[in-house]
Image (spheres, rainbow, N blue to C red):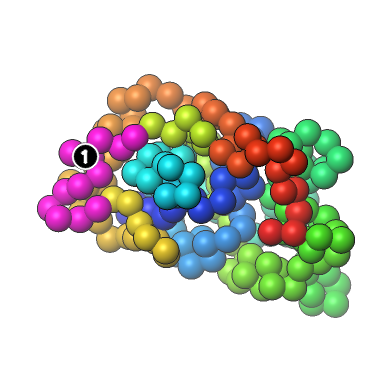
Amino acid sequence: MRLYSYVVARDYGFAPNPFYGVCTLATCKPKLRKMASLGDWVVGTGSAPNGLTGHLVFTMKVTAAMDFGTYFNDPRFQSKKPNLAGSLKQAFGDNIYSPGLDGHWNQLDSHHSLEDGSPNPQNIRNDTDPDRLLLSDHFAYFGEVAPQIPDHVRYLHGQDLCAGRLYKVNFDAAHVTGFIDWFEGLGVTGVQGRPFEWRKNGALRRGA
């Protein structure tokens, strides 16, 4: 069992998407999505610009993984397809990719599209390589109410649980179990707060 940690630089409820009972990491962090195995934990901490350094934005135990085509067509995840004219929760749906018959990817009008709603080639390349997303039914998402990770959990043996620009992995067993024990001790699961970026007027629904 491994733990992956990264900074959630842009907290829109898109990556991760914690809504409708399942937390999904379907875009961004391609190397993490490729490497994480079932049973591993993913930890997302807050960014300095949001004043949330060292705070827990979300954590998920990876309980499933699948390819984009399966995700797109699975009846369980149709609610995660975006509707930019709907609520913020609907607008930031992450179920946006399906394989085309020509070997190219189709991208729904979404947070990762260009400003005019057309497909964004750069985001398509980054999101679909690998053709794999992570899912969890054992998670907690805090967003703007992210709790601070205590120093005795964050720092161990000279290593900081919080990552920098990329992501961290290969924490020793004591660090991993210490974090999990602290999180489980909070006694909360599911969505606890709104994404940080939603507090801004006119949250950017596309063109990211």
Q: Quadrant of the C terminus?
A: bottom right
Picture coordinates of residue 153, whole percent (x, y): 23, 40
Name the residue furthest top: 187
At x 28%, y 50%, the residue is 161
Residue 165, horizontal then vertical, whole percent: 42, 63
Segment colored magenta: 148-160
Q: Amino acid at mark 1?
A: Asp
Residue 194 vs 39, above or below: the answer is: above
Q: Observer-nearest residue: 163 or 198?
A: 198
| Figure check: 176 above or below 79 | below
Image side of residue 101 versus residue 179, left or right:
right
Label 1 SS? helix
> Would you say 22 lies left or right of 50 here?
right
Image spot of residue 95 (x, y percent): 72, 50
Q: Residue at x 56, y 45 (%)?
A: 11
Look at the image and say whether residue 177 sits in the magenta stretch.
no
Q: Is residue 107 visible?
A: no
Q: For mark 1, what is the residue?
A: 151
Residue 84 in view of the camera: yes
- Tally of numbered tags: 1
- Image coordinates of residue 142 in percent, x first then y, are 49, 33
**Relative to 106, 14 lies left or right:** left
Tell which residue pokes out farthest to the left in this image.
157
- Decide: few, some or many residues near mark 1? Use Cα within 10 Å; few <14, some 14-19, many ≥20: few
Q: Quadrant of residue 112?
A: bottom right
Measuring 42% from the left and 55% from the top, which residue is drawn there? 6
Question: From the viewer's perspective, is residue 163 above or below residue 122?
Answer: above
- The residue located at (83%, 36%) in the rendering is 86
Q: Residue furthest bottom?
A: 102
Viewer-closest of 99 and 150: 150
